[in-house]
Image (cartoon, rainbow, N blue to C red):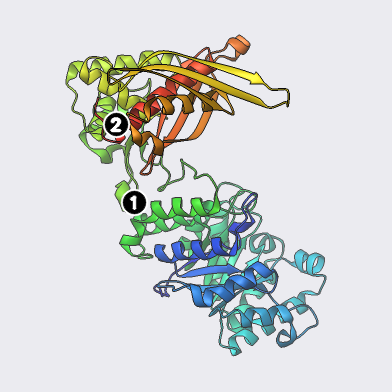
């Protein structure tokens, strides 16, 4: 287990799973738990056994299917019901039977919640906390207590909120996590409350929601004020605006404050883990997420690129490799010579001064017409190659293409595309059918070229985005199409721009096929 002097406690599988649109199976939860253990967290909250069958099943399977190297599992649940002994409460029994060595109890610390939500007295609520904690301790479980709505409760009735903390600590709770359940606190006022509660000498933790956009800042403020246990969710998952992003919290504490929380090699795996969890949850990664987002160390402005060319640290707060990320140069109409030279170097090309100037002017000219190269690296690399070669070279040339869209008597709409190409000295005519014009063109160009380039069988169009750039022209507006393609080893994106959406799509598709052949080893 990680050093017990400071806890990193993940609650993705329970609190994070409450995010709208996020639905985890038991297999998903097991997979995420393995990733979290690989990160090196100390505790993984697996869910609420007894409250729902999925969480009960998770704990049952975890006993044989999880081989945790760093973390301990925590079972989440509530204090006993009013008027019932903890030993007789079936939900408390489910916590005992979960097999988890740690139990995290949620308890009311706001007097109004006790009286209106629990519908019991303030004294009985304290008795529920005392009885449940002491019972689970006697059963050999380590107990943490989440003091729900603590900060709102402290504002309303500080004496009672503090009594909840004292009662839990005296009953044997190892940690009392102060919860900003509604997410409404700001760092300065939260730190004052944590410092005041720390005078009780109870060991304190912090659990923050992000409704003010301050969950990470509030967590760091609480640590500075005395908390030695931080809770959060990977990628900031959670209901409403989410929970404190555990990746950001860990990286800030370890890289900025010098805390020794996870092994350095695990920290260097953080970006991979963030994206691996996104794959399991089927939630699109936030490209702008601190530390682990693909844009976290992406530089676009020419001024930045000029400085980075001298020293990358001039515009980066850490070395991206510390969290397993990379610096990226984005090429756009804001680019200067330094931007394209660095991007070229990144792609394996060395440009002379004349080539850099030519490429910069070409990028600015095309972006003024609607192209975007920061989102289409493959298109930029082809443009760069054309600049280096002094001309555009392709594996095939296009004589013509056409698309017919037909509505059948059955009501089905089908598309048929015909392409006429020249490749390796041959004139090729091929026709493809698809469920739309772009799909039909994609099939036709593959049929035309697959005999000459069998590798195209592995190419797959995986994303297609359309944006209208000049809406004032109605249906005659300029359209930008971004296509993302994939083979067995990676993905790439290409861009096309035209007043005709099919023509724009063909531009992006033609580049996608060309770049796919380059990846397959066919030089231009």
Mark 2 surroundings within 10 Å by alpha-carbon count, few (fewer than 14), some (14 through 19), many (20 or more): some
Image quadrant occupied by the N terminus = bottom left
Locate residue 69: give its quadrant: bottom left
User: Can you say whether 31 is above or below 334 in the image?
Assistant: below
* Nearer the observer, 412 or 493: 412
- The answer to whether marks 1 and 2 mark residues whose Cβ atoms lie closer than 8 Å is no
The quarter of the picture where the C terminus appears is top left
Image coordinates for residue 181, horizontal then vertical, percent: 64, 59
Under tag 1, what secondary structure?
A: loop
The answer to whether residue 42 is above or below residue 267 is: below
* Residue assigned mark 2: 518
Q: What residue sits right under mark 1 in the picture?
A: 324
412 and 164: which is toward the camera: 412
What's the residue at 22%, 15% (across, down)? 390
Dividing the picture into quadrants, the one containing residue 495 is top left
Residue 52 at what x, y percent from top left? 69, 68
**Residue at 41% over, 31% down:** 493
User: Of the numbered discs in the image, which one, if any, rests on residue 60?
Assistant: none
Q: In this view, does 445 lie to the left or right of 197?
A: left
Q: Distance of mark 1 from mark 2, alpha carbons?
A: 27 Å
């Amino acid at each position: 287990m990680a050093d017990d002097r400071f806890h990193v406690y993940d609650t993705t599988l329970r609190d994070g799973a409450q995010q709208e649109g996020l639905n985890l199976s038991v297999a998903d939860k097991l997979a995420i738990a393995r990733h979290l253990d690989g990160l090196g967290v100390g505790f993984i909250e697996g869910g609420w056994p007894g409250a729902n069958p999925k969480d009960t099943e998770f704990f049952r399977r975890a006993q044989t299917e999880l081989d945790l190297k760093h973390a301990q599992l925590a079972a989440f649940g509530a204090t006993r019901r009013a008027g019932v002994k903890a030993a007789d409460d079936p939900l408390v029994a489910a916590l005992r039977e979960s097999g988890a060595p740690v139990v995290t109890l949620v308890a009311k610390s706001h007097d109004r919640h006790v009286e209106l939500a629990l519908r019991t007295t303030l004294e009985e609520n304290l008795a529920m906390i005392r009885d449940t904690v002491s019972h689970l301790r006697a059963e050999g479980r380590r107990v943490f207590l989440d003091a729900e709505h603590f900060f709102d409760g402290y504002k309303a009735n500080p004496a009672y909120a503090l009594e909840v903390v004292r009662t839990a600590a005296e009953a044997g709770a190892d940690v009392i996590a102060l919860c900003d359940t509604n997410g409404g606190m700001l760092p300065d006022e939260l730190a004052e409350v944590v410092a005041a509660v720390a005078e009780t000498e109870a060991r304190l933790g912090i659990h923050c929601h992000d409704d003010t956009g301050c969950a990470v800042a509030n967590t760091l403020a609480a640590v500075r004020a005395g908390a030695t246990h931080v809770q959060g969710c990977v990628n900031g998952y959670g209901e409403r605006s989410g929970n404190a992003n555990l990746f950001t919290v860990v990286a800030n504490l370890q890289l900025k404050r010098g805390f020794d929380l996870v092994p350095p090699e695990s920290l260097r795996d953080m970006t991979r883990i963030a994206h691996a969890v996104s794959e399991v949850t089927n939630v699109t990664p936030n490209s702008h997420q601190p530390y682990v987002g693909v844009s976290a160390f992406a530089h676009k402005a020419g001024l930045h690129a000029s400085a980075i060319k001298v020293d990358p640290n001039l515009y980066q707060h850490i070395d991206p490799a510390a969290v397993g990320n990379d610096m990226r140069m984005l090429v756009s109409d804001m680019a200067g010579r330094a931007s394209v030279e660095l991007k070229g170097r990144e792609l394996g090309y060395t440009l002379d001064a004349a080539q850099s100037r030519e490429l910069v002017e070409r990028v600015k000219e095309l972006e003024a017409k609607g192209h975007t190269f920061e989102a289409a690296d493959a298109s930029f690399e082809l443009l760069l190659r054309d600049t280096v070669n002094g001309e555009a070279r392709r594996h095939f040339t296009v004589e013509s293409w056409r698309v017919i869209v037909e509505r059948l008597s059955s009501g089905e709409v089908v598309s048929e595309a015909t392409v006429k190409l020249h490749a390796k000295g041959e004139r090729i005519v091929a026709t493809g059918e698809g469920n739309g014009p772009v799909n039909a063109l994609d099939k036709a160009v593959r049929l035309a070229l697959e005999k000459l380039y069998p590798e195209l069988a592995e190419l797959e169009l995986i994303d297609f985005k359309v944006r209208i750039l000049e809406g004032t022209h109605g249906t005659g507006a300029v359209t930008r199409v971004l296509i993302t393609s994939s083979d067995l080893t990676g993905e790439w994106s290409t861009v096309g721009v035209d007043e005709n959406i099919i023509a724009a799509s063909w531009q992006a598709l033609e580049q996608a096929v060309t770049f796919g052949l380059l990846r397959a080893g066919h030089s231009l």
